[in-house]
């Protein structure tokens, strides 16, 4: 079965990413096309990138990197839940992505962004990163507004219409993750 990690892309105190990711998980759990799991980067206590060798070399030396790599390697695709901070993704999410390389390769990703402009600029920034780490990102993205999907800019109350977009995004992520499976299998076999 295809495995999809729903990544909580913020570690900031008072973050909304966890609430948004839990909402995505509620929608995902109604499906039977993949196994979905919440992955909170905060749980891995990643410091600022502290590996002495570039991640593309695959020679991880730190226990936290090895634990993070082992977790990410288990997935066929991802849903990145990202806030928009100053027109970009959170530093914590970028740092978590930068720790690894091969574990991301030849997988699929979808995006759920939130912010004053629906997280659109953060997602566009994240799409550039995905290309470099060999993740195929899907077109459909979920854009949540701090103005209309958060009561008083704090309590997450998404409009019901977003559920349809989440479903469409998950459809694409699962489809692409499945389509890339032969590529991952060839690479694992040394091809």
Image (cartoon, rainbow, N blue to C red):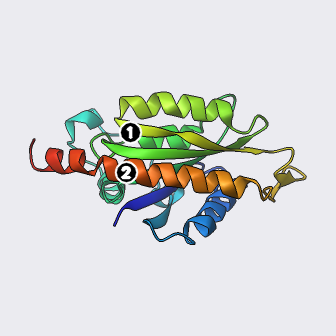
* Number of numbered tags placed on the structure image: 2
Coordinates of residue 60 in the picture (x, y in percent): 24, 45
Q: What is the residue that sits farthest to the left in this orientation? A: 190
Coordinates of residue 59 in the picture (x, y in percent): 20, 42
The residue closer to the viewer here, 102 or 25, is 25
Of callouts 1 and 2, which one flags the residue occurring earlier in the amino acid sequence? 1
Residue 80 vertical position relative to residue 163 in the rendered view, above or below: above
Task: Name the quadrant of the N terminus.
Answer: bottom left
Q: Report helix, strand or loop for mark 2.
A: helix
Q: Report helix, strand or loop for mark 1.
A: strand
Q: Which mark is residue 135?
A: 1
Q: How crowded is the residue under tag 1: few (<14 C-alpha within 10 Å), some, or many (20+)?
A: many
Residue at image mark 2: 177
Coordinates of residue 96 in the picture (x, y in percent): 45, 44
- Pair 1/2: label in front: 2
Q: Is residue 38 left or right of residue 123?
A: left
- In space, the residues marked 1 and 2 are separated at their CA atoms by 10 Å
Task: Name the quadrant of the C terminus.
Answer: top left
Q: How crowded is the residue under tag 2: few (<14 C-alpha within 10 Å), some, or many (20+)?
A: many
Say which residue appears at 30% left-offset and 55% top-offset: 73
Residue 60 in sight in this render: no
């Amino acid at each position: 079965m295809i495995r999809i990690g729903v990544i909580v892309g913020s570690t900031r105190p008072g973050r909304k990413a966890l609430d948004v990711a839990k909402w995505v998980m509620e929608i995902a759990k109604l499906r039977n096309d993949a196994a979905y799991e919440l992955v909170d980067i905060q749980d891995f206590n990643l410091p600022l990138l502290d590996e002495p060798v570039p991640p593309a070399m695959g020679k991880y030396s730190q226990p936290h990197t090895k634990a993070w790599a082992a977790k990410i390697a288990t997935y066929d695709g991802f849903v990145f839940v990202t806030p928009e901070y100053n027109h970009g993704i959170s530093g914590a999410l970028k740092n978590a992505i930068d720790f690894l390389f091969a574990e991301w390769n030849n997988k699929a990703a979808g995006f759920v962004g939130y912010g004053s402009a629906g997280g659109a600029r953060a997602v566009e920034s994240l799409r550039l990163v995905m290309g470099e780490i060999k993740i195929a990102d899907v077109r459909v993205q979920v854009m949540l507004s701090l103005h209309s999907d958060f009561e008083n800019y704090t309590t997450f109350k998404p409009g019901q219409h977003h559920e349809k977009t989440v479903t469409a995004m998950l459809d694409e992520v699962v489809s692409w993750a499945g389509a890339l499976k032969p590529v991952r299998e060839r690479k694992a076999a040394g091809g």
